[in-house]
Amino acid sequence: MSDLNTQAVAKYRNNFLKEVEACVEEGDWVKMCMQCGVCSGSCPFGPHWDHPPQELFMMIRAGKREEVLTSSSMWMCTSCYNCIVRCPREIPITHIMHGLANYAHRLGLAPKNQPTRHFSGLFWNNIIKTGRVNELKLSLGLYFRDGLVSGIKVGMAMASVGIGMVLAKRLNPLELLKPHGCKDTKGIHAMLKKAREIEDRRKGLTAA
Ligand code: SF4
Ligand code: SF4
């Protein structure tokens, strides 16, 4: 169990709803859910997940901490915003889904082999370096996530798409050697550092 997880467990003593309210983005909305099921019925992918949004919110209130935080469901949210638009209580469901995923990740409880989690990590690590996404590096990172052989196979299968993108000037192979960044990369790094400090302080999860 990570230090952060130990702190969170000690602090909230099994009151998972309070923990979510304090530590998850927009988590204080969860108690407003009246379990009407509109969000789950509107979610294009919900039926294919272990726990669609309404069910996750019910589990949070029931104190099912481990089941919620180790679930892959919130990692599947595509931010289509269907649920938010239709929720009669105007609950920011999409933000809570991403907030739960982020919190589970920070606690070290998120499922290890979840593909969208892998994509999120690659995307984040890619964009924070220069402030701009290097599409080629991101694509290669995805192709080779399961090793060299599988990466070559995926790369060959996607070759015509890649060539099409290069010809359409949507992908530049030289980006691998000389990635383009935003004008003030140091400023981006300072901003991210500050944001993380503020976030940690707000959630009371810093060691101090
Ligand atoms: S639509 Fe809103 S109120 Fe209804 S179950 Fe979903 S989150 Fe709860
Ligand atoms: S925003 Fe996410 S949870 Fe909401 S309907 Fe779309 S995919 Fe489902």
Image: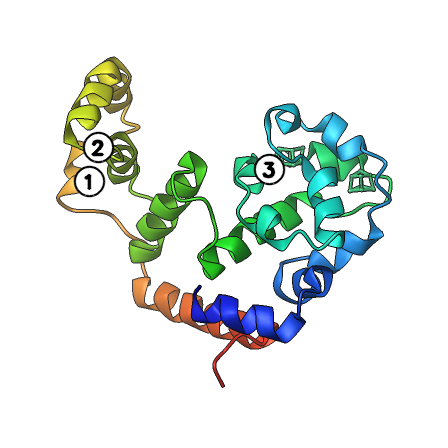
Identify the residue shown where x is 57% and y is 69%.
8
**Residue 75 placement (x, y as % from top left):** 52, 40
Q: Is mark 3 within 8 Å of ligand 2?
A: yes
Q: Residues within 10 Å of mark 3 (few under 14, many from 20)?
A: few
Location of ligand 1 given as a quarter of the image: top right
Q: The disc labelled 3 sits on which kind of residue?
A: Ser
Residue 132 visible from this viewpoint? no
Residue position for label 2: 172
Return the mark for residue 96.
none
Left or right, 163 with respect to 103, comes to left
Total number of numbered labels?
Answer: 3
User: Mark 1: is the Cβ under 8 angstroms from ligand 2?
Assistant: no
Q: CA distance from mark 3 to mark 2?
A: 28 Å
Q: Tag 2 or tag 3, which sits nearer the N-term?
A: 3
Q: Which mark is residue 79?
A: 3
* Circle 2 crowding by C-alpha within 10 Å: few under 14, some 14–19, many from 20: some
136, above or below 98, in the image? above
In three-dimensional space, the C-alpha distance between marks 1 and 3, rounded to whole angstroms, equals 29 Å
Residue marked by disc 1: 175
Q: In the rendered view, tell whether residue 98 sits above or below residue 200.
A: above
Q: Position of residue 143 (x, y in %)?
A: 26, 30
Image location (x, y in percent) of residue 65 = 62, 54
**Secondary structure of the residue carrying numbered label 3:** loop
- Answer above or below: position of 187 versus 117: below
Mark 1 or mark 3, whichever is nearer to me = 3
Crowding at mark 1 (Cα within 10 Å: few <14, some 14-19, many 20+): few
- Element under disc 1: helix
Amino acid identity at mark 2: Asn
